Image (cartoon, coloured by chain):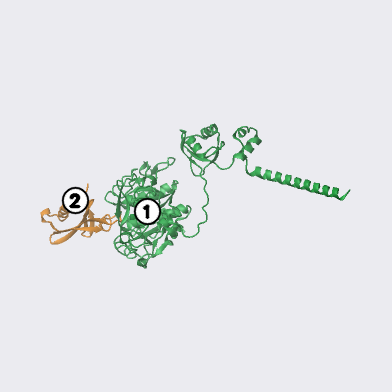
Chain colours: A orange, B green
Amino acid sequence: MSISKDGAVENARKDLAKRLEIDAADVKERSVEDSDFPDMSLGAAEDGEMSGQMITPGWRIRLEAQGQTFEYRADKNQVRAYKFKGKNYRI
Amino acid sequence: MNRNNIFIHVALALVLILVAAFAGQLNRWRKEWKSHVRIVPAAEKKQATTADEIALSETRYFSHPEVLVKFKSGVSRERIEALTSRLNDRIEDRIENAAGWKSIDDLDNADAAAIVAEYAQLPEVEFAEPNFEIKLPDAIEGPLVPILPRDPQFNDQWALANSGQRGGKEGADISATLAWATTTGSEDVVVAVLDSGVDYTHEDLAQNMWVRPSDMDPYQDNELGTIDDLNGYNAIDNTSDPMDENGHGTHCAGIIGAEGENDLGIAGVNWKVRIMPLKFMNAGGFGTTKDAIEAINYVIDRKKAGVNVRIISASWGSTQRSRALEDVIRTAYENDILFVAAAGNASTNNDRAPHFPSSYNVPNVISVAALDRNDELAKFSNYGSKSVAIAAPGVEILSTWLANQYEEKSGTSMATPVIAGVAALIVAENPRMSVDDLRKRLMASTDPIVALKGKTTSGGRISAAKALE
């Protein structure tokens, strides 16, 4: 099923809240911008993952919580946490 | 004897000598004629009964087999002989390495099309075709004449023929139209597209898809058992269906081998080829190293089983090194299979920050960077004078997409199948070329590009025309 921009932001907020063990209401949306990512894992490949090397349009989502900024990347197929504590996660 | 009689006798003698000499020559001419050409009425040939007469008859009618017939598997030799005998034909030969095919000599000297029709209607026959006479082409003098396909969107395929459309640089292409004067590909060459699968029903691809031959056993995996790989292999689900759910693999397949001259969409680098679809990436366009290995193992297995798969096109990767993946690519090398890999899209130097599988130091790996329509290195493309071998067009590339659609996409993913496609053209012209020589040929077949100096090993853009010189 195709993911919308708003749906991607909502999924990212919930994921970050879960990872930080805080309430989703405490996660603020800082920015959402259209972006071309270098590959089909949105430049955020998990360990052991290979992806198509095609420029992929999507959204760069920046969220704020506990005084820090966290980046998520999304397109119509997926949402990914980018370098959360040094690692990428597909959610 | 008076002088007049002497003259008469001498003249008569000369006439007799000339007559005898002429008769002798006539006889020699007649013998020569007989030894070369024998035209015998049909009624006479059916009267040949003795061994000598049959031998003579065979001599008379032995010219070249007239039709090639493929009998269905399971039809016995005795049954085939009975059928050909009933039609007053003769099996000329079994065709080596083409199971089921027989060469048939028609003893009635009938029209080849009529004989083909006669055999085609037999329930025992799978296919019949005329034995076309193949002539060596006349010596080509002067430059090759470009061949332009009539596919309606060909004008948008700047990678194949850049006329400066949409602000591009004229001639910044792979010289495909000149290459096509030599060959447009071959159905005998199989290219494995290791990707998100391929929409094998796409109308511009369907005719060029590989299908497991009916006389080849289904794929046997030690752990998974039997997989009926009629249309290829799906390593994600370990099933027989490699249908693309993303579009990326279908796009790459079209670059290699969208059918040419079919009045539809685009033309591939190869108008004719066989694309073996392999699926290891999902609907999102990503997959696991383990599934990539499974799919490469499948290719190697099919090669060993007799499929002429000579090239793997790999438009994917990551920065994570896998020894297991490297090992299976090396095994592909040992089985004479070229591995064409995308250099990556991070705008980084692979000499310093490697990208895999393109950076594996295995002799069959050829790493591909992307160029735009102005012969500039694409702003996203990785590079590396030691680790990136060659470049090909990879920006705004039009190709096939899901559901009979066409889309423009960019990436070293798109440059990779261009190189795989040119490799397939080379193999079409040089079927016995080794993987080492194939890679060398590609590396020696570039047009130097200023923007690539110090960025790739070859420093050039692939030229399909040079590759076929």
Q: Is residue B37 left or right of residue B309?
A: right
**Residue B323 found in image quarter:** bottom left
Residue under numbered circle 2: A4
Say if residue B62 shows up in the picture: yes
Disc 2 crowd rating (10 Å Cα; few below 14, some 14-19, many 20+) is some
As drawn, B262 above or below B396: above
Residue at 60% x, 32% y: name it: B43
Q: On what subunit does the disc labeled 2 rest? A: A
As drawn, B40 above or below B264: above
Q: On what subunit does the disc labeled 1 rest? A: B
Residue under numbered circle 1: B313
Out of A90 and A7, give the one closest to the viewer.
A7
Q: Residue furthest left?
A: A25
Q: What amino acid type is highlighted by mark number 2?
A: Ser
In the rendered image, residue B234, in percent from the top left (x then y), is placed at: 33, 46
Number of marks present in the image shown = 2
Return the mark for residue B303. Answer: none
**Residue B148 found in image quarter:** bottom left
In the rendered image, residue A53, in percent from the top left (x then y), is placed at: 30, 56
Disc 1 crowd rating (10 Å Cα; few below 14, some 14-19, many 20+) is many
Q: What amino acid type is highlighted by mark number 1?
A: Ser
In the rendered image, residue B159, in percent from the top left (x then y), is placed at: 35, 57
